[in-house]
Image (cartoon, grey):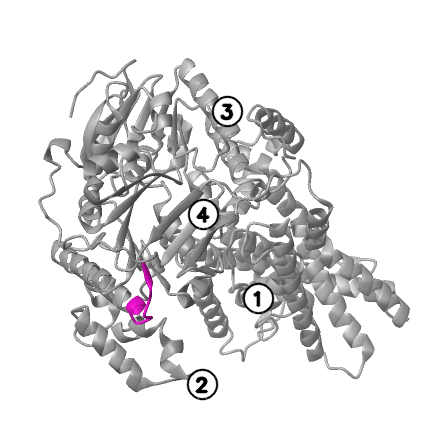
Amino acid sequence: MSGSPVPGGPVLEADGALKVFPGVTALDRISFALGQGEVHALVGENGAGKSTLIKVLTGVYRLDAGEIRYRGERVEFASPLEAQRAGISTIYQEVNLVPQMSVARNLFLGREPRSRFGLIDFAGMRERASEILRGYGVRSDVRRPLGSLGLGAQQMVALARAVQADARVVIMDEPTSSLEPREVDKLFRTIAELKEQGRSVVYVSHRMEELYRLCDRVTVLRDGRVVHTGPLAELERLRLISLMLGRNLAEVAAEGLTKFGGRHHSHAAPVLRATGLSRRHVLDGVSLAVRPGEIVGLGGLLGSGRSETAKAIAGALPLDSGEVAVAEKPVPGGSVAAAIRAGINLLPEDRKAEGIIPTLSVRENIVLAALPRLSRAGIVSEGDVDRVVETFMRRLRIKAAGPGQRVAELSGGNQQKVLLARWMAMNPKVLLLDEPTRGIDVGAKAEVQTLIDELAKEGLAVLLISSDLEELVEGSDRVVVLRDGAVVGELSGAEVTEEKIMAAIAGENDD
Amino acid sequence: MTTQTTPAPPVPATQTSRERAGRLFQQHGALLVLAVLLVAGTVAFDSFTTPANLGNIATASSFLAIIAIGMTFVIISGGIDLSVGSLFVLGGVLAAYGSRYGAAVALALPLVVCGAFGLVQGLIIARTRMAPFIVTLAGLLAARGLMLSLTDEGATTYLVEDDLFARIGQGGVFDVGYPFFVMLLVLAVAAVFLQRTGFGQNVYAIGGNEDAAALMGVPVARTKVVVYLVSGLLAGLAGALNAARLSSGVTILGIGLELDVIAAVVIGGTLLTGGAGTLGGTIAGALLLGVIQNLINQVGGLTSSFQQVVSGAFLAVVVVTHRVLGRVREDT
């Protein structure tokens, strides 16, 4: 940690901030200082603690230990309202406004202009709202419900709302993720104006170009700790990425720490072929192919379009254009059922929200998707189900008291295996694994990795998404690197190294 | 697996005519149907458009309308209040019981007790974040139990013993009873609060997106407490007025009334999902239910229970229409 002086004196500081959630230390006694009139980049991968830090600074969460100082004084904001009143406003990544209410009412909620008798002056409010929003390039009727505007326009309303409050500190969490280039320009101009006025900005983003263009200093978080803080211009891109991903460049050496076996080269024709997958703001012409028996890794930072690519292939993300084909046969887009019929199965990133059904048993969870195949004329054959469940519990070494045990009672690793079993029961051709080992303990992780390897050896085409670079490098035969929703590099064979992946993410090859 | 909403296509600068028509129907559909029914009633029945009959409809609908005003706040905030039917009955019994001590007590007692019910429900909902459905269901049972224990399981009916108080319920101007004017007064105050104050904006914001509202600095808990307090108070007020009108605290009328109230609010264009709705629509919805009842009585040969069949069918039509209009708006 380098203790660089805070320019202009600190306006907002966290000192020894500790925030513990059940089972996880989200912020581990971190210190953070935002200078007057600076644009401060806050970066880190998923679960690094960025969101928690923002919520602690803005009164959404209370600290378990440590303190927050604002303009030199210790503060304990009890609510976002208090933080806002004190002059700290926040623009959240997901547009956090009320879609049914009009644009004008959203803009002024909580500080509506008053007429005599203290009643809201709607005419004045609409007039001022139109005027303010014109400055942000939003020319819609301010009486329209906010939800009827495009996402970018909504984000500009959120920006206008945050900035018009006499905010000394504006916190922006991935503000550009849904903006058009024209709107991004406006955002950057607004940030420059804020800076000129001596106001401070905390800027959260994964887009390297933006960070280097806008920010004065950077704080890198990883696993709830500050791993670096200092002027951004002095920090090379590659170094920044390695800090975020927690990979020391000097230490990067393939030592075979994961349980993946050797590479399995395959020369068969690709079984999965995705061509030009595009969706506005999300994916930009992603193409890739996976051969049977091959594990293709998807690399890139959070928000680069990895999960979205997997979801698009699995039919769970509507596309503007692009095509997915299995064994050269096109799969109708936008339908999960069609993708499953074609043999594509997705193990989603958030297994709690999108995968297991915790109140059902291991047995029920495994056969859930395969029921149509295990039944005749709509009647489920109990014998077939028992056989399938028995086979997969043994094959995937699922540790449970029995097929009747509730999935919620299993460990994370075994839950993940149950999900794997569910898709294996479908006899898939293509398996899309989104962070298959996240949040499970080391032993289970090794087992899941071994399993993935075995599955590929048996001829399955596997697309592997992992934030764990080591896992990605050792598990994959090839790695496709994404940035801002587009493929920026493809590495194969000896090229698959952590350094090369990070270089591709940093964009050092193309500019 | 979640699918993300498709980003909206470039937005035209003003509302499309389709969009506007959808909104108009949602907000004024009840009024439109009300007007149609009034015309139909006039054509079909000679006795319908008499001052006495119209006055009767207006007066009879005011009790439901007063409670529905409170319910409109609750539903716009994204909640539901099932306790109002029980509180209405409890309020009536308390008013009749209190009338022996004068009109002031007859009016104050139900307001205090029903207000307290609403307050406690609001506090539980706001602080524990429990589902309003469950909390107010508990309130429904508790209020009904209290009412039954006050009336010896319904065996005792308190009579209104104060003439001044009775006159509030029974008197009127021409053929329209005072309760209707009380309702208008409540409506006027409520409309100002809902439409022209920060509190009203907060109610809409919470119902529209509670998390966003909290992050925008809306005092979510306080707003919810006030909303349920208002609902309880108005249910008590309606109960008191009803007791004054009937000269007694009737223990059976009003069981299940909460469902009629919710129906009136929804028919009036308020979305059950919260975040949108108007008081004008609610009043139109309440009057509409009253007119349907009256028309069915005019037909003769049909029992008044048939009114519920018609109201129910109409409610179903309204809800489906909302859904369809909502989809139209998403498409545009």
Sequence-earlier tag: 2 or 3: 3
Mark 2 or 4, closer to the camera: 4
Can residue A13 be seen here? no
In space, the residues marked 3 and 1 are separated at their CA atoms by 51 Å
Label 2: state its secondary structure. loop
Residue A330: x, y in percent?
47, 59
Q: Is residue B122 found left or right of B26 in the rendered image?
A: left
At horizontal 37% and vertical 48% (from top left) the residue drawn is A288
Sequence-earlier tag: 4 or 3: 3
Question: Which numbered dot is residue A277?
Answer: 4
Residue picked out by circle 3: A186
Check if mark 3's residue and mark 1's residue have beta carbons within 8 Å.
no
Mark 3 or 1, closer to the camera: 3
Residue A439: x, y in percent?
21, 52
Asked which quadrant contains residue A484, the reply is top left
Residue picked out by circle 2: A377
- The magenta stretch is A422-431
Residue picked out by circle 1: B258
Q: Chain of mark 3?
A: A
> Label 1 crowding class (10 Å Cα cut-off): few <14, some 14-19, many 20+?
many
Check if mark 1's residue and mark 2's residue have beta carbons within 8 Å.
no
Label 3: state its secondary structure. helix
Residue A128: x, y in percent?
61, 26
Indicate the quadrant containing the N terminus of chain A: top left, top right, bottom left or bottom right.
top left
Q: Is residue B20 found left or right of A80 in the rendered image?
A: right
Q: Is residue A219 above or below residue A471?
A: above
> What amino acid is at disc 2?
Ala
Asked which quadrant contains residue A15, the reply is top left
Same chain, labels 1 and 4: no
Same chain, labels 2 and 3: yes
